[in-house]
Image (tube, rainbow, N blue to C red):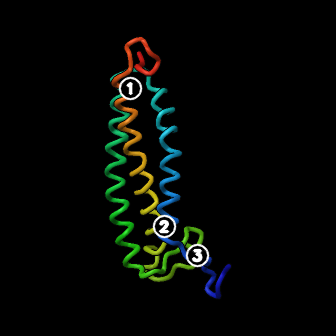
């Protein structure tokens, strides 16, 4: 439903944004596992997974904190990305950035244990297994 100012209603809720971010994070873990299989060297594969985990940790902390701050600063006027054309003023883009940053932060928060779990799985793999690498 659209209102007279062309904003799609109902507005986003924090529960829905975090749930979708968690779903995206769960989908990202198998993608990370598949991407790690393209790295054949054992040491490089472990380094890739460790860096992915540390990057996920940094994105989780910054995305969630900044996203929640922006959400609080918008005072309930949270807009979807497709409502970008309704943004006006200098502070308007924050209304779109808040759910995007929060979703990315939750995605990274779910990806974090997956990345470190894959790291320990590759680390504990037998020398002659396909998971170990070359």
Between marks 1 and 2, how big is the CA–CA gap? 34 Å
Between marks 1 and 3, how big is the CA–CA gap? 46 Å
**Number of residues whose C-alpha sits closer than 10 Å to that of mark 3, classed few (under 14), some (14–19) or many (20 or more):** few
Between marks 2 and 3, how big is the CA–CA gap? 25 Å
Q: Nearer the viewer, residue 63 or 23?
A: 23
Residue 66: x and y in percent read: 34, 66
**Number of residues whose C-alpha sits closer than 10 Å to that of mark 2, classed few (under 14), some (14–19) or many (20 or more):** few
Residue 67: x and y in percent read: 39, 66
Tell me if residue 114 comes above or below residue 109 in the rendering.
Answer: above
Residue that mark 3 sits on: 85
User: Of marks 1 and 2, which one's residue comes earlier in the chain?
Assistant: 2
- In the rendered image, which quarter is residue 83 located in? bottom right
Which residue is at a point 46% across and 78% down the rendered structure image? 92
Q: Nearer the viewer, residue 13 or 6?
A: 13
As drawn, the label of residue 94 is none
Q: Secondary structure at mark 2?
A: helix
Residue 69: x and y in percent read: 34, 71
User: Of marks 1 and 3, which one's residue comes earlier in the chain?
Assistant: 3
| The C terminus, quarter of image | top left
**Number of residues whose C-alpha sits closer than 10 Å to that of mark 1, classed few (under 14), some (14–19) or many (20 or more):** many
Question: Mark 3 and mark 2 in contact (Cβ < 8 Å)?
Answer: no
Residue that mark 2 sits on: 15
Question: Mark 2 and mark 1 in contact (Cβ < 8 Å)?
Answer: no
Q: Secondary structure at mark 1?
A: helix
Residue that mark 1 sits on: 122
């Amino acid at each position: 439903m659209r209102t007279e100012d062309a904003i799609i209603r109902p507005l986003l809720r924090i529960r829905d944004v975090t749930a979708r971010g968690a779903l995206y994070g769960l989908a990202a873990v198998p993608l990370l596992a598949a991407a790690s299989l393209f790295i054949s060297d054992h040491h490089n594969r472990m380094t890739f997974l460790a860096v992915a985990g540390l990057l996920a940790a940094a994105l989780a902390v910054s995305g969630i904190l900044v996203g929640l701050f922006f959400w609080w600063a918008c005072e309930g006027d949270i807009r979807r990305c497709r409502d970008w054309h309704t943004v006006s003023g200098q502070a308007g883009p924050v209304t779109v950035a808040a759910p995007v940053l929060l979703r990315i932060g939750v995605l990274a928060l779910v990806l974090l244990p997956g990345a470190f779990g894959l790291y320990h799985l590759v680390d504990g793999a037998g020398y002659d297994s396909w998971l170990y690498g070359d």
